[in-house]
Image (cartoon, rainbow, N blue to C red):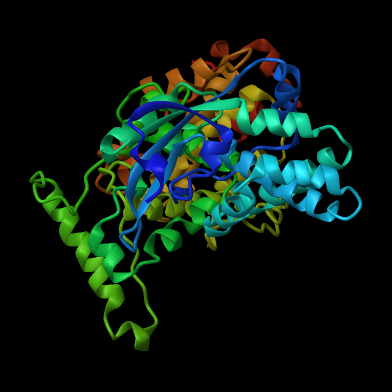
Amino acid sequence: MSESITLQHRTIISVKQLLSEGLLTIPEYQRPYKWNQHNIASLFNDIKTQCDKPAYRLGTIVLHKSKDKDDKDVLNIVDGQQRTLTLMLTVMAIIKHYRADNLTKPIEAKAIGKILGELANTVPALAKKQEFASDISIYNLHSNFQEIRRIISRGELSIEHIDFLLNQCEVVIFILEDESEAFQFFDSQNSRGKELYPHDLLKAFHLREFSAYDERLNPNIKAQTVAHWESLEDDELHRLFSQHLFRIKRWIDHKPARNFTSRHVDIFKGVSLHKKELPHYAKAMMITHHFVDDYNSNMHRHIDAQAMNYPFQLDQKIVNGRRFFEMVEYYDTLIERTKTIDSAHASENKDNPSYATVYNQTLNERASKIVKILDTYSDKWRQGDKYTRNLFDNAFIYYIDKFGMQDLSQVIEIMFIWAYKIRLRQYAVKLATMDNHAVDGMLFKRIKDATLPKEVWITGVHPLRGNGIKESNKKTDNDIYQLFGHLNYLTDK
C-alpha cells in the first residue's frame, strides 16, 4: 500500500508526489478527457510565468478511496481528471524526449533523470493501467501528447520549468472514504463549474446505481450499457436533454422548461429497483424490469431471435442505473427517427399526389403538405422558427411515445396549427414565448389525459382570426400563413 493513501481529508502535495501515487484510477463514470491544445498552452504559460515563485497551486484533486473488482485499493479521481491526465502526459512526453536525447545531450538527459527520479517508472505504469472506453478520450490523449512533445522539442519547456512543475507546483488533495460523500462532493464541485453539463452529473449518479446483481451476472454490463451514451458528443447529449427530454417532462406537468441546468437533474433521478425498501408504486416497475430481463435471457430467444425493450414512457418515473442509460438510448433513437420524415416526394400535383412517410407510414395529403412546408420554408432557420419547431417536435415525440403511429396524420395537423399559431401572432418568437405557450396550452395536457389517440385530435383546435395575426406575417410569400389558409384555419370571425 502506498504512503499517500493514508492522507487525511485535505493535504497539499507536489505534482511529483501526486504522480508517484500508483493507486490513482480514472473511474468509469468520469466524462471523456476533453482538454485541448488551448488548455495545454494555458497550463504551460502559467508554469513559465510563475516559476520565479517558491510554489504555485494548480488546483484541487478529489479522490475516493475504494476497492477495484479484484478487491485491491484504488484512489478514484472524482474531480481533477483533466488536469491529472495532462500532468501524466507531460511526464510521459518528457521521458520520451530526453531518452531520445540521451546520446546527443547526455548532460541534459542526466539532469532530467535526476529530476524525474522514480517517476520515470511509476508514471508509465500508472498510464498503462488506465482504461478509456471513449474514442474522444483516446483521440485527445494522443493529440495532446504529440503537442506536448512539440512544445518540449521547441525548447518552450526548459529543464528549469520541468523542475518547477514537478517540485514547486502543488495540488490540494481531498481523500474521501464514504462513497455517497464522494459523489456529493463531485456534484457540488461540478455543478458550480462551467465545463460540466448537467448530464455529466446524471451519468455519475446512475453509474453508481447499477445493481451488484447485474454486475455479477455480467462484469461488462456498465461498459455495454453506456456505449451509446459514450458514442454521443457532449453537445448532442445536452441537446437531447435540454431541448427534448427536459422540456417534455416539464411541459407535461405544466412547468416551465427554458434552460436545463444542474438544479434540474433530480427530474431524471427516480427509483432504484435493487433497494430492499421500495415504495408501493415501484412494485409494477420491478415486475416489468425482471420480466424483460427474464424474457431476453430465455433459451427460446436463440430460436426466435426476438428481444424485448423495457417499455419506457416519458411521463413515468425514472428507473435508476442500467435502465436510465437504456432510456437515453431509446429516446435518442426515437427522436432521430422522427427527424427522418420523408417529404422529398410529397408532390403538390393533385392528379398524381405522392405522400410523405414517417416510420414507414404514409401520411395523408394534408399532413404531407405540412411536413413538406416545415422542411422547406425559407424562414425555418430563424431562431423564433426554431423555437416554434421545437414545440411541434416535442408534442410529436410525446404523442408517438404514448400512442405510436395511430392516427398520425390527424395529430400532425392539430400539432402544426397549435404550435405555429404563435409564429403568426408574434413579431418575434422568443424562448419565453415558446415556453409559456407549452405551459399554458392544451396540447401536452390533452395527450397526457387521453386514453385513446382520437381524444388528442377529434376536438380539433380553434382557427386563427385575421385580426390576431401580425400584418408583417400576412405576406403572399409567407409559407406558414398560406398553409393556414390552405388548411382552412384562418377566419375573420
Is residue 34 at all visible to an observer of this figure? no
Q: Position of residue 41 (x, y in %)?
A: 76, 30
Residue 377 shown left or right of residue 131 in the figure: right
Nearer to us in this view, 219 or 108 = 108
> What is the residue that sits farthest to the right in this orientation?
104
Horizontal side of residue 224 vs 271, given as left or right: right
- Decide which of 390, 418 is in the foreground and name it: 390
Q: Position of residue 367 (x, y in %)?
A: 55, 46
On screen, 123 above or below 183?
A: below
- Judge left or right: residue 369 versus residue 323: right
Q: Nearer the viewer, residue 40 or 454?
A: 40
Query: Considering only vertical position in the picture, is 107 above or below 392?
Result: below
- Residue 352 visible to an observer of this rendering: yes
Kindly indicate the quadrant of the structure image that contains residue 289: bottom left
- Residue 291, by quadrant, is bottom left
Horizontal side, residue 92 vs residue 231: left or right = right
Q: Residue at x 36, y 49 (%)?
A: 207
Residue extending farthest to the bottom is 303
Q: Position of residue 287 (x, y in %)?
A: 16, 61
Q: Nearer the viewer, residue 391 or 36?
A: 36
Residue 95: where, in percent of width, then height? 73, 50
Q: Residue at x 73, y 20 (%)?
A: 475
- Tally the numbered discs: 0
